[in-house]
């Protein structure tokens, strides 16, 4: 059942537009994460829903109430805010802090009722803070203090709980403890949680759905799998990531690989023919520098194959420890057709991967730049009775550039991309 409805909101700070055309709805028991780069509008969105910042256009409806038509104390009976961990200026006891959550229900000059004390006590029990009741809040650890602030929010008996990075600065065990607590409260008590996250992995593990903001607009919204994709993260955060499913938690986990630099040699595509780990450092450097990289044919279980997978490099794969087949050779040529340069690394050659040298030969025939790293020299890594050596040396005759290191390859590619830019 939809309870919170955000309809086409547009927010400004003076003439700065901070949110544009933001619309979505949230049902009860839903745990929603808000992510986005700095300045994308996350805090503004929370402030708008909290009723603090009135949108210029659009509305926020909670169970059909327009929250901007409600009085402050009425909003506070429905929406609780948990700020980032902070120390309070005044040193209250834990039970005093939690009881403050009842303020929206207590009339001016009235005292707390028995019921208010009961609700505060229940909130402390749920958050495992009852034993801290008489302690001063500033004397607690970060994790304990955050549980107390959540207890205060619970004492408000809200429909919506808004959190701004509730676990920032907490160490990992407290992070998990707080997230588990919030998720349980959300599911058991049926309220909505809307929380800003910086940590993709925490968001992926605990949220039902995610709102990805970019430049004040919703870039993507929906299930974790739908929103936290390689493509979306790359476009919005300018970061290359690897996304996997965690075997234990069964949730997505995201590993940043590299920041895509401005000035990257966009448009230059290279195909790396490698194996046995001889191509791994080069592939990593190429990706970090922003080249488009493909590779193949590589046997599954080969170190270079594993590295290529972790870097999201499109790969022509072959079965483990078996010879490259005709079909795989053809697939490799198809990839090579799309690149500007082919690099053959100093991999050992046996009968199984000779076809990979022929692929480099074919690249030359088609007029591509071919760079061969011949250190250690082919004679020292030829396990074909001289056949591989013969083929490699022929590449030189046909115009392949021979070098001795990855650095020389990077230098040549840089010159190639400069030439491309000058054109
Ligand atoms: P986030 O929480 O995603 O970092 P914010 O919601 O804080 O983003 O900010 C969104 C945009 O609004 C940014 O361009 C920011 O500079 C601007 N902004 C935020 N707060 C203010 C403010 N008090 N005055 C002027 N501009 C602001």
Image: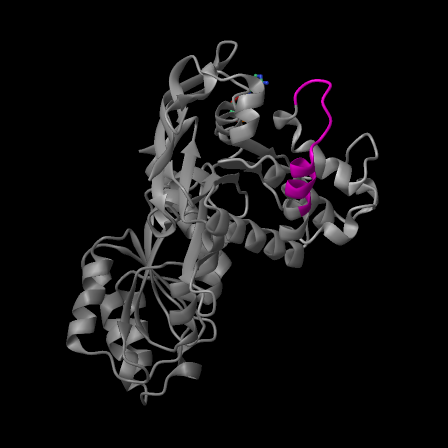
Instruction: List the single residue furthest toward the front.
Output: 114
Q: Position of residue 344 (x, y in %)?
A: 35, 66
The structure residue drawn at horizontal position 38% and vertical position 27%, both measured from the top left corner, is: 6
Observer-nearest of 96 and 220: 96
In the displayed structure, does residue 238 sit left or right of residue 94? left
- Above or below, comparing residue 52 to residue 203 in the picture: above
Observer-nearest of 48 and 323: 48
Query: Looking at the figure, which quarter contains the N terminus?
Result: top left
Q: Position of residue 170 (x, y in %)?
A: 68, 49
Q: Position of residue 49 (x, y in %)?
A: 48, 26
Q: Is residue 13 magenta?
A: no
In the displayed structure, does residue 13 sit left or right of residue 318? right
In the displayed structure, does residue 399 sit left or right of residue 263? left
Query: Looking at the figure, which quarter contains the C terminus?
Result: top left
The structure residue drawn at horizontal position 65% and vertical position 33%, both measured from the top left corner, is: 101
Q: Quadrant of residue 324?
A: bottom left
Q: Position of residue 40 (x, y in %)?
A: 48, 30
The structure residue drawn at horizontal position 39% and vertical position 64%, both measured from the top left corner, is: 308
Is any part of residue 404 visible from this angle? Answer: no
Observer-nearest of 32 and 391: 32
Instruction: List the single residue furthest toward the top.
Output: 15
Is any part of residue 187 visible from this angle? Answer: yes
Q: In this picture, which residue range is highlighted in magenta?
A: 107-121
Q: How is the image coloured?
A: one colour
């Amino acid at each position: 059942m939809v309870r919170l409805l955000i309809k086409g909101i547009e927010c400004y700070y003076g003439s700065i537009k901070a949110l544009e055309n933001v619309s979505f709805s949230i049902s009860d028991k839903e745990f929603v994460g808000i992510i986005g780069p700095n300045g994308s509008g996350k805090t503004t969105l929370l402030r708008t829903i909290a009723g603090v910042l009135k949108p210029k256009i659009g509305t926020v409806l909670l169970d059909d109430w327009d929250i901007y038509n409600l009085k402050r104390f009425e909003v506070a009976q429905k929406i609780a805010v948990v700020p980032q961990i902070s120390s309070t200026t005044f040193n209250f006891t834990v039970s005093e802090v939690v009881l403050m959550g009842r303020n929206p229900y207590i009339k001016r000059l009235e005292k707390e009722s028995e019921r208010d004390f009961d609700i505060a006590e229940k909130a402390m029990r749920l958050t495992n803070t009852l034993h801290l009741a008489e302690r001063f809040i500033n004397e607690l650890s970060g994790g304990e203090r955050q549980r107390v602030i959540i207890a205060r929010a619970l004492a408000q008996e809200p429909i919506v709980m808004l959190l701004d990075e509730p676990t920032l600065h907490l160490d990992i065990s407290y992070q998990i403890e707080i997230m588990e607590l919030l998720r349980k409260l959300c599911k058991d008590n049926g309220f909505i949680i809307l929380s800003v996250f910086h940590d993709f992995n925490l968001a992926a593990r605990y949220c039902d759905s995610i709102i990805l903001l970019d430049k004040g607009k919703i870039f993507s919204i929906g299930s974790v799998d739908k929103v936290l994709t390689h493509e979306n993260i790359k476009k919005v955060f300018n970061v290359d990531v690897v996304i996997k499913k965690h075997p234990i938690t069964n949730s997505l986990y995201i590993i940043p690989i590299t920041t895509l630099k401005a000035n990257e040699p966009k448009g230059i595509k290279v195909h790396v023919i490698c194996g046995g780990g001889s191509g791994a450092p080069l592939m990593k450097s190429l990706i970090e520098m922003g080249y488009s990289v493909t590779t193949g044919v590589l046997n599954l279980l080969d170190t270079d194959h594993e590295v290529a997978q972790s870097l999201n490099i499109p790969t022509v794969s072959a079965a483990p420890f078996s010879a490259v087949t005709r079909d795989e050779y053809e697939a490799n040529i198809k990839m090579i057709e799309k690149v500007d340069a082919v690099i053959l690394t100093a991999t050992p050659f046996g009968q199984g991967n000779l076809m990979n040298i022929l692929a480099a030969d074919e690249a030359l025939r088609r007029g591509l730049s071919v760079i061969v790293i011949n250190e250690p020299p082919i004679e020292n890594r030829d396990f074909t009775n001289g056949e591989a050596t013969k083929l490699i040396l022929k590449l030189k005759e046909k115009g392949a550039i021979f070098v001795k290191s990855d650095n020389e390859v990077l230098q040549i590619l840089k010159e190639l991309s400069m030439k491309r830019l000058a054109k």
